[in-house]
Image: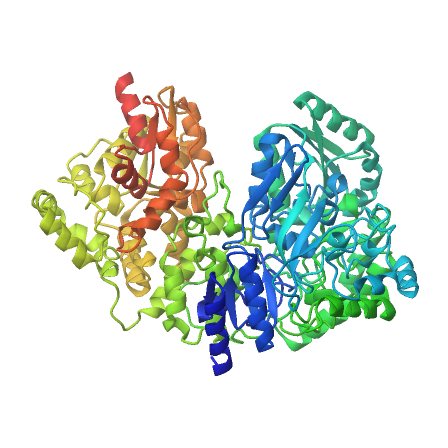
Amino acid sequence: MADPYRDLARELAAAVRGDVDFTPTARALTTMDASNYRRVPLGVVAPRDAADVAAALAVCREHGVPVVPRGGGTSIAGQATGTGVVLDLTRHLRALVELDPATRTAVVQPGLVLDELRAAAAPHGLTFGPDPSTHSRCTLGGMIGNNACGSHSVAWGTTADNVESLRVLRYSGGAEPAHLGRGWTGAPPGLREFAEDEAHRALVRTGFPELPRRISGYALDALLPDGPGAGGAPDLARAFCGSEGTLAVVTEATVRLVASPPARALAVLGYADESAAAEAAPALLPHHPLTVEGMAADLVREAAGLPRGGAWLFVETGGATPAEARAHAQRIVGAADALDAAVVTDPADLRALWRIREDAAGTATRMPDGTEAWPGWEDCAVPPARLGPYLRDFRALLAAHGLRGAPYGHFGDGCIHVRVDFDLLTPDGVARFRRFSEEQADLVVAHGGSLSGEHGDGQARAELLPRMYGAALVDLFTRYKDLWDPDGGMNPGMLARPGRLDDDLRFAVLPKRPVDVAFGYPDDGGDFSAAVRRCVGVAKCRTTTAPGADVMCPSFRATGEEAHSTRGRARLLHEMLAGEVVTDGWRSTEVRDALDLCLSCKGCRSDCPVGVDMATYKAEFLHHHYRGRRRPAAHYAMGRLPQWLRMAAPFAGLLNALARLSPLAALAKRLGGIAPERTIPVLARRTFRRWARTRRAAVRGETVTLWPDTFTDHLSPEVGRAAVRVLEAAGRTPVYPERAVCCGLTYVSTGQLDRARTVMRRTLDRMAGVPDGPVVVLEPSCAATLRTDLPELLPDDPRAARLAASVRTLAQYLQEYAPAWEPPRLDRPVAGQTHCHQHAVLGEQADRRLRERAGLTGELSGGCCGLAGNFGFEKGHWDVSVACAEDQLLPSVRAAGPDTELLADGFSCRTQLDQLAGRRARHLAEVLAEGLDAEA
């Protein structure tokens, strides 16, 4: 860091009570938002209050350093990136100051997450109308900055339509916030004269297109006495919305709430293609729906639950009762000229359908063949009546440039989201990106549209605003910016005097050739850089509200720190590959420290819309980071657990007795890098394999290979014995490998990948004598390792792919190979947790159906238990491990009645419950075996 910036950091630290961080980690975490752009800031300030914001602005102004206000960092046009000081408004300024049901208003700080406001308003029958698909992590300040909209805008409008007043601090405006509402109070000097100039008014009256989603440019029409929502006076708060952090910093906002219908229904309408769906959308608006959302088949990976068609409209209705909401939806079906239709009211089915739509922001980043697709023309809007013709012309323009994209979005408002398979890695590809952008801007304008219909212009489109508004009106934008920010310190390069749309692309700094890696990365062409590029920044991993059945991202939910989110870690890996901010490559301590609290739960592999697999990236990093170096003690103690357990097996009784002696246990934990709060698990006095060798049952019916994983064999052989009982009851005879086998899980999770491959190859050799066919694996983490890590670490060994394809959970095997078998009727409620690896890799549908057939009622919780194999045992991880368990698992167990069966198929989950709750959970196999014995 140059001396002037060291002085800047020191003065900021002295001036503000909040956090000042100029470290490589803080800078790396904020180089990007969810756009194609990257800028390296000098540092990050997280102010505690408005006084801190004012102090930070004053110091930055003195040093001539620009400021970038940042919320959730989900902006798609680049406006949440900058080269100066980033103001992180999410860490401390996230309070709901007041909620008044009588006036239907709320006072919020800018870092408040939208879903937290909605949750607080819901008991009063209220909600905040705008709801972007990022509602679980976007902030109110970011929504104001971008004038965010969401799927319900046909009913409740944009953020600007729902803002009553704002408190803002200008870069050069002093320490007292200005209060913006109707009238000129709070306006910077000269703004009223600027707005009342008749020549300016004439330009504004004639230069702004009439359409519901005009987000591009500054909202100068709100300064007219007869402007949008005006009551004969200018509306400074409305004019401020959509200014993308270029005018001032919002420190507080008063927003309007709307009545939320207590019952909802969804009319899903199928059409031949997206143009047909688009042309049908305007006719549905007179029926007053809450949403009219559209998407085509090329965005839907699984069409289950959707009616027949090549494109669909999701038309939500509300009512005082479920019957009223359903009747409203049925009227819309009757009025729609659709190929097929369905009306959905079941809450679970509604969530599943809306998830298809909301995940499109991530799903769209990959074409069906796996090709990468990027934003840039993410949210153009045209008058709804022009949407059908516009989409046809847009498809033709894509074809003319040899590009592909999958449009979807807010058809009722004429707003289309699309990610296009631009080549942003080569000069020719970037040149084509520019040519397409210029022609696309002209196409949108020809249809009477707005370059941005939701996410703002940022760097992606601001350069092209003259094509939409003309040079004279864009000159007014620049003068408007200068009145608010005469020193030019607020987010320069956005909206006024914008940067070029093909500069600062985040891919330019990545290696031009694939780096040498251990995993195969089959979905990314073997390229680790491409795997890291998967993270586009939509930040679903930053969800703070209950994730339901989802897992991602337990460490972020425990700490609230960006560095401990999937996105944060991916950003650090990106910067590691770039080498500008994080300069030590695989030896980086910044990346190591961020990955340290990654539980390797694999939740992001399934829950991230783009399939970022941080568990694999962590293993890869640790492999390189510690190559040729001494590792942490826990890597030797727990990373090589299978080896130690085999050696300890003959002495299990003695070792268990010694482990109960506190001084010896404390010494063992200290030497092994184990958290002192942990209890050392009890070793089985008789391993499962030893039991199986002495019990050679006659072969009855078909045989099935039962995998004797390390945990079942040495730590919970009762699970293996129970599985044998169940399989035999189903008419199958379990068989086993003659010699010990290991999936390599503990070596993978600690990044000992050379050793993992050695173990895996030895296992494949030992499986040679096992009959072909399915392999039942009882420990979910071992099954997931065999299914994914094995073929990705040994991509050239066909035996690895065959074994991976043969892996089944017990429930999957019974469903697929013994469908007629009837489990015992147990008829009791259950609680517990679906193993995170099973959720992410194996799926839980078969287990759910088996439980239902056995009369085991109730839902298992999502999330992660927090023990996660070696993670929760490692020294320094105790607090986060407990916090993860407290997120969902422990509350669900505490709420369970005394007759509730606690289920946890994973050894880690059972251990966590035993050590934190004092409750014994069982594998599903144990519960079924007990039922079989009771029936015998």
Q: Nearer the viewer, residue 303 or 463?
A: 463
Q: Which residue lies most toward the bottom here?
A: 3
Q: Where is residue 99 in the image (x, y as percent from the top left)?
A: 60, 38
Q: Is residue 772 left or right of residue 709?
A: right
In the rendered image of this protein, does residue 277 appear above or below residue 555?
A: above
Q: Is residue 206 left or right of residue 26?
A: right
Q: Is residue 475 left or right of residue 111?
A: right
Q: Which of 318 and 169 is in front in this view?
A: 169
Q: Which image quadrant: the C terminus?
A: top left
Q: Position of residue 678 (x, y in %)?
A: 22, 47
Which color mode does the image show?
A: rainbow
Residue 869 appears in the figure: no
Tell me the residue at 17%/39% (across/down). Answer: 693
In the rendered image of this protein, does residue 39 appear above or below residue 806?
A: below
Q: Which of 57 and 598 is in front in this view?
A: 57
Residue 730, image quadrant: top left
Q: Which of 409 and 24 is in front in this view?
A: 24
Q: Where is residue 368 in the image (x, y as percent from the top left)?
A: 62, 54
Q: How many marks?
A: 0
Tell me the residue at 47%/35% (across/down). Answer: 845
Residue 433, image quadrant: bottom right
Residue 203, image quadrant: bottom right
Residue 102 appears in the figure: yes
Q: Where is residue 623 in the image (x, y as percent from the top left)?
A: 34, 66
In the rendered image of this protein, does residue 243 appear above or below residue 425?
A: above
Q: Is residue 255 left or right of residue 727?
A: right
